[in-house]
C-alpha cells in the first residue's frame, strides 16, 4: 500500500509541475507585448502557428526538466516505477502534449484578459478546479454524474491515465489511446491559440 501511495504521489507531482508551468506561460506573452518583443514577432513572415508551437515546445521542455528531477528523486527514495525505454518515451510524449495543451489554453486566456493582474488571478482560479475535476486525486467512478462528464472532458484526466499506465506498467493500448486524445486536443488548442495570438496587442 505504501508503494502504491508513493507512486501515486510521484505521478501527482509530475502533473503539478506540468500544469503550473504551462498554465502561467501566457504571462510571458503579456510580458513580450509590454517590452515590444511580441509586436516585432508579429510583423515577421513567421506563421502564427509556428510561434505558438514554439511556446508550447518551450513549456514542454521545461516540464521535462522538472520531470527528470522527480524521476531522480523517485529512484533515490526507492519508489518502484515501471522504467523501460518505451515507458520513458511515452512519458516524454505525454508531458510534451499535456504541457502544449495547457500552454495553448494559457495563451488564449492571455489574449483575452491582456493584463498581468487579471491573468494571474484567472490562472490561480482555474488551476485547482482542473485537478479536482480530473482523476488526479480520486477515481472518476466515485464522482457525481455531472462531475464525471467534466472529468472525462478534462485533458488532465488523460494525462493521469497515460502516466499511470506507463509508470505503473499498465495497458499499452490504454496509454496509446490517451496519447491520441492529448495529440488531438493539443493540435486543436494550438490552432485556436494561433487565431487569438495577434489579439494580445489589440
Image: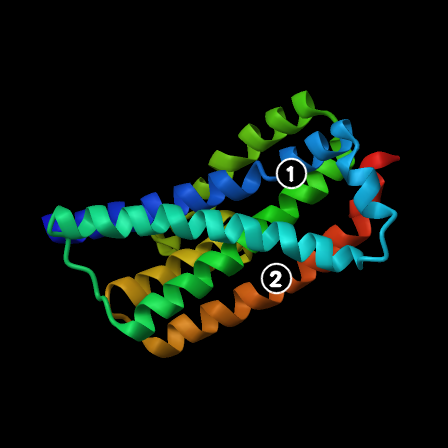
Q: Residues within 10 Å of mark 1 (few under 14, many from 20)?
A: many
Q: Position of residue 169 (x, y in %)?
A: 24, 69
Q: How many numbered discs, if any?
A: 2
In the rendering, at what x and y percent does residue 88 appear?
32, 66
Mark 2 neighbour density, 10 Å: few (under 14) some (14–19) many (20 or more):
some
Q: Is residue 193 left or right of residue 21?
A: right
In the image, is residue 201 above or below residue 135? above
The answer to whether residue 172 is left or right of residue 121 is left
Give left or right: position of 138 versus 110.
left
Residue placed most toward the observer, 136 or 75? 75
> Under tag 1, what secondary structure?
helix
Residue under the image location 54 percent in, 29 percent down: 124
Which residue has dot 1 on it?
A: 26
Q: Is residue 112 left or right of residue 27?
A: right
Label at residue 50? none
Residue identifier under label 2: 185
Q: Is residue 79 visible?
A: yes
In the rendered structure, which disc, 2 or 1, sits on the residue that comes first in sequence? 1
Front-most of 72 and 202?
72
CA gap, disc 2 and disc 1: 18 Å
Identify the residue shown where x is 65% and y is 64%: 187
Amino acid at each position: 500500500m505504501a508503494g502504491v501511495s508513493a507512486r501515486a504521489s510521484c505521478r501527482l507531482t509530475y502533473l503539478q509541475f506540468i500544469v503550473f508551468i504551462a498554465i502561467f506561460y501566457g504571462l510571458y506573452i503579456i510580458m513580450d507585448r509590454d517590452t515590444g518583443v511580441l509586436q516585432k514577432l508579429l510583423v515577421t513572415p513567421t506563421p502564427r502557428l509556428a510561434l505558438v508551437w514554439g511556446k508550447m515546445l518551450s513549456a514542454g521542455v521545461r516540464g521535462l526538466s522538472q520531470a527528470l528531477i522527480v524521476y531522480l528523486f523517485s529512484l533515490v527514495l526507492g519508489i518502484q516505477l515501471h522504467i523501460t525505454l518505451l515507458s520513458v518515451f511515452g512519458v516524454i510524449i505525454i508531458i510534451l502534449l499535456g504541457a502544449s495543451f495547457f500552454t495553448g489554453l494559457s495563451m488564449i486566456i492571455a489574449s483575452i484578459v491582456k493584463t498581468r493582474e487579471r491573468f494571474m488571478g484567472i490562472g490561480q482560479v482555474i488551476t485547482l478546479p482542473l485537478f479536482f475535476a480530473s482523476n488526479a486525486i480520486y477515481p472518476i467512478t466515485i464522482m457525481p454524474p455531472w462531475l464525471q462528464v467534466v472529468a472525462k472532458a478534462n485533458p488532465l484526466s488523460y494525462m493521469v491515465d497515460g502516466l499511470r499506465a506507463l509508470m505503473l506498467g499498465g495497458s499499452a493500448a490504454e496509454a496509446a489511446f490517451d496519447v491520441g486524445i492529448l495529440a488531438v486536443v493539443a493540435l486543436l488548442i494550438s490552432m485556436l491559440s494561433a487565431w487569438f495570438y495577434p489579439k494580445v496587442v489589440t
